[in-house]
Amino acid sequence: MLKRLLWFFAWVGAVLAEPVGLEPQRALFLQAEQALEQGRIDEARHLRDSLEGYPLQVYLGFRLLDHRPGAEAEIPAFLAHHGQTRYAAPLRRQWLEFLARKEAWDDYVRAYQASDDPQAQCDYYWALHRLGRAAEAYAGAAKLWDSAESRPTNCDRLFAVWQASPAFTPEQVWKRLGLALDKHRLPLAHALRDLLPAQEDRATADFWLAVHDNPRLVEQCAGWKPADPRQGRIFAHGIDRLAGDEPLRALGVWNLRRGEFRIEPGEQARIDRRLAIALATQRYPQAATYLGTLPDGVADAQTRAWRIRAALLRQDWPGVLLGLEQLDASERSQNLWRYWRARALEALGDNTAALEVYKALAGERDFHGFAAADRVGAKYPLSFEPTPVAEAEVQRLAATPAFRAIQEFRALNRPGEAQKEWLYALDALSKQDRLIAAKLAQQWGWDRLAITALAKSENQGDLSLRFPLAYGEAIAQEARERNLEPALVYGLVRRESAFDPGAKSSAGALGLMQIMPGTGQDVARSLNEAWTSERILLEPRVNLRYGSAYFRGLLDRFGNRFALATAAYNAGPNRVERWLPASGPLPADIWIETIPYSETRQYVSAVLAYVAIYRERLGGNAGRISGLLTEILPGKQGVAKPDRPLGVAVCP
């Protein structure tokens, strides 16, 4: 331990020494930025040229070119010298946009690199068209066209010339119309309808739109022309839509009328799978039977999994074993299915076989491994394996240009730029250097980036790196005030944000415990605290207080059942209310495995595993996760499902 501490402080001293030596250049860099912002471009250029060897010289060069009118001609030289930096992609995009505005199509084709950006792709294929390479341009247009998403406006001219050529057919409109409706992109669907040349085709498209809006039209006889193959696609689309809310009704119509229509075999198989999954996730009693009747050519990994879950929901243990036998070898080897095999064997009285599986599985470090360990009283496999990194290797990585730039961004208190540089640099590192980067991030206090680097190194053994004890005082206090075990709060934080206080999700959740602003306002009101703006959720102490209070409220709402409260934290309490058993209690591990949302199912399992690990990290005396798996009781919203398809009229 003493050796480690001496090494750590020596390393810190080395890192801190460098920024001091860079202070004169740092002052010039800041002067250059100020000159740039005030429009004194020549002065900024001169200062940039004087910063040879300074870690952020390339960044300053990028800033001199980034979206500055008149600077475009300098971009090719920058790309030639710094094409491997994170600044190359935005500048190349800027250069291509400039060439497109100039209609310099020869230059555009030479400068273009394969891209996922539809705007750049459309300009590239337009350039090919203008250069007389029509076949390539039209092939590219067709690829861009086959999408449920709207395309940028610069694609319009490409699509226009393609649509005026013999290469374009109405079938391509029908194909995209189906894609748009499958993704519920109604504005695009209506625009595509207007592209159909024939009145009869537009009427068929109108009928498709009507079925999309009211899928119960699949029950009616009027309006359908079964001999038309497009109507088969429309009928299948209507069944797909109806299955979302009324899978049993959809199943009855499908079984009765599918033979009337010309539907491709692949589409029929897709609808069979859709109905089977809908019945299972909405907990209809006939789901297991229907899933079991799917032929091998129709069943896939998802339907095989839900066949087992449907049997679990009914605690039909022979059915569970039968479903497990249908898995392929790779699926059968997964920890969750090994666990359920053991549970089924145990329930059926084959304790010897069950014990053998449990003991083997108890060596795995995940929820199912821990749950298996609990069944046989085995220890959790929580040995801590320090990352094998030498001091010289850390110093070597810290001295590379990218990591010197990261340190300088940190010295300038620009964490956003530092993290961007880090993530870009990480992708170029070897697995061993990613291990070193993980250690470096830990020493810099970047817990989330240490976790990311370790995951990319494929080294999962260093639990001190993977499960840091950041914000320990705040978490301990908030847990104490909410009568929560600290490991529970740590488990939530680790899963929600990996300890990134500035985390922002695409849905708008913020901070360490990923709190939605509306939820934050509600919690602030309940705590009699002032709500100024959503930005307070980016303050770690506030976020931990609100997240802990919210989770405490969920535990109270769901009778202190950890699985339910954790699922509600992820998916919302109203959904969890709907997922409660309709009648009779259910073991918590079965309830978790049969959560309809895969994201929430994985979330609850992960948090439980993290709680076990954090209990060990915090002292190891807080009991087993089985103590958190309290039996799930029926809920008020649990409604028994009908056990047979509803009646459907037969069309003449």
Image (cartoon, rainbow, N blue to C red):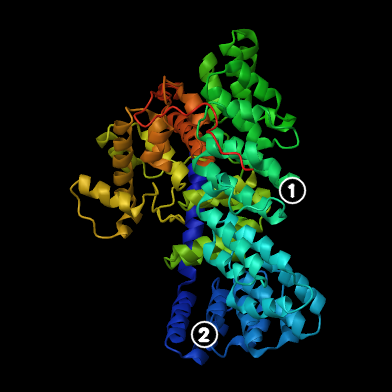
Picture residue at 50% right of the left edge, 59% below the top: 15
- Crowding around mark 1 (Cα neighbors within 10 Å: few <14, some 14 to 19, many 20+) is few
The residue nearer to you, when weighing 514 against 11, is 514
**For residue 49, what is the image quadrant?**
bottom right
Q: Amino acid at mark 2?
A: Leu
Name the outermost residue toward the front. 652
The residue nearer to you, when weighing 107 against 405, is 107
Picture residue at 39% right of the left edge, 52% below the top: 511
Quadrant, the C terminus: top right
Q: Amino acid at mark 1?
A: Glu
**For residue 357, what is the image quadrant?**
top right
Q: Position of residue 584 (x, y in %)?
A: 42, 19
Q: CA distance from mark 1 to mark 2?
A: 67 Å
Q: Is residue 81 visible?
A: no
Depicted 5 relative to depicted 385: above or below: below
Picture residue at 75% right of the left edge, 72% below the top: 168
Which numbered circle lies on residue 47?
2
Is residue 198 found left or right of 450 in the rendered image?
Answer: right
